[in-house]
Amino acid sequence: MATGTEPHPNSGGVRTGTRAAIAAPHLRTDRWWLAPAVTAAGLLAFIVYSTWRAFADTDYYAAPYVSPFYSPCLAERCQTMHAGPNADLFGSWWGISPAVIILIFPLGFRLTCYYYRKAYYRGFWASPPACAVPEPHKKYTGETRFPLILQNVHRYFFYAAIVVAGILTYDTVLSFRDEHYRWGHMGLGTLVFLLNITLIWAYTVSCHSCRHIVGGKLKHFSKHPVRYRMWQWVGRLNARHMLLAWASLVSVALADFYVFLVASGAFDDPRFF
């Protein structure tokens, strides 16, 4: 008979008296560790690359291209004040790489994203590493305590991500100019920027927060046909959120690396017209 004082079944992890006594740590015979290992390797590679580029503070502008890691430049020391939607908000006192200011917002959006939470929870924290494989932690508190409770700011980072995507769209439009800022240019970098902004927008609007904003709190879809159609469209993108998350992560790194190669003189931007 329950007295109301029994510990919660999950308070001691999976090794409690309420679970079946199995000697093996799990009954999985497949390579269950492969998926979290690949995820961790992919995320770690991006972290290393983006950290290097953010603090390199050089080779981020090659007219008319500006790296998405450095746009918009908000300090006087930026090399791209004449190239895009830049504003000298920080004056000359800001001595750190301009990318440090910018990357807070897209990285905050991705770190709090529902898919990325699952990815790094499993990949780095083994929480849990795979289905039917117990996590090593004895206690599970979810996202109810600090610091994981801060994941709830995801919606606000979504609003910031919309602004960032708008700025990168403007940068993509500017990529149709030549190095003398004359319109009618199209190079390989223009295609790289077009691919990147397409994936950035697709990933951003496929976000769960966007889906809720578009169609949430509606009791009757029939009375809101426009929002219902938008909700359906976002829902179809949301079903591919994981794919878009990875594709946009690769594309933004590719766009930055392309600008780095051109700016450092590794090769000239091929022109189509």
Image (spheres, rainbow, N blue to C red):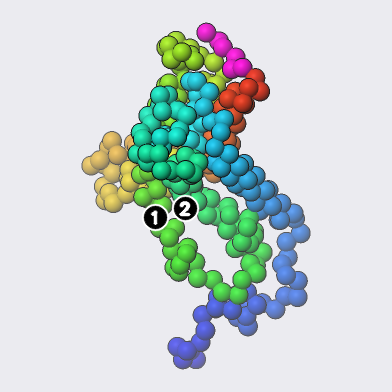
> Does 268 appear above or below 30?
above
- Name the kind of residue labelled 2 in the image: Thr
Q: Residue at x 41, y 28 (%)?
A: 81
User: Closest to the observer: 244 or 8?
Assistant: 244
Residue at the far left: name it: 223
Q: Which residue is mark 1?
A: 153
Whether residue 238 appears in this view of the structure is no
* Residue neighbourhood size for the residue with mark 2, other residues' Cα within 10 Å, grouped as few (<14), some (14–19), many (≥20): many
- Classify residue 122 as left or right of residue 207: right
- Looking at the image, which residue is at 51% across and 87% down? 6
Q: Position of residue 193 (x, y in %)?
A: 51, 26
Q: Earlier in the sequence, mark 1 or mark 2?
A: 2
List x then y, in percent, for residue 14. 63, 74
Task: Depth check: give the residue in front, 225 or 206.
Answer: 206
Q: Is residue 10 or residue 47 the one in the foreground? A: 47
Circle on res. 175: none
Q: Which residue shows up at 47% across the image and 39% down it?
A: 98
CB within 8 Å, label 1 to label 2? yes
**Which contiguous range is marked in magenta?**
268-273
Compared with residue 95, is residue 22 higher up or lower down, i.e. above or below? below
Q: Which residue is mark 2?
A: 112
Label 1: which secondary element: helix
State the SS at label 2.
Answer: loop
Q: Is residue 143 above or below residue 258?
A: below
Q: Tag 1: residue type?
A: Val
Q: Assign the magenta stretch its main secondary structure.
A: loop
Quarter residue 42 falls in:
top right
From what the image shows, is residue 78 above or below residue 185?
below
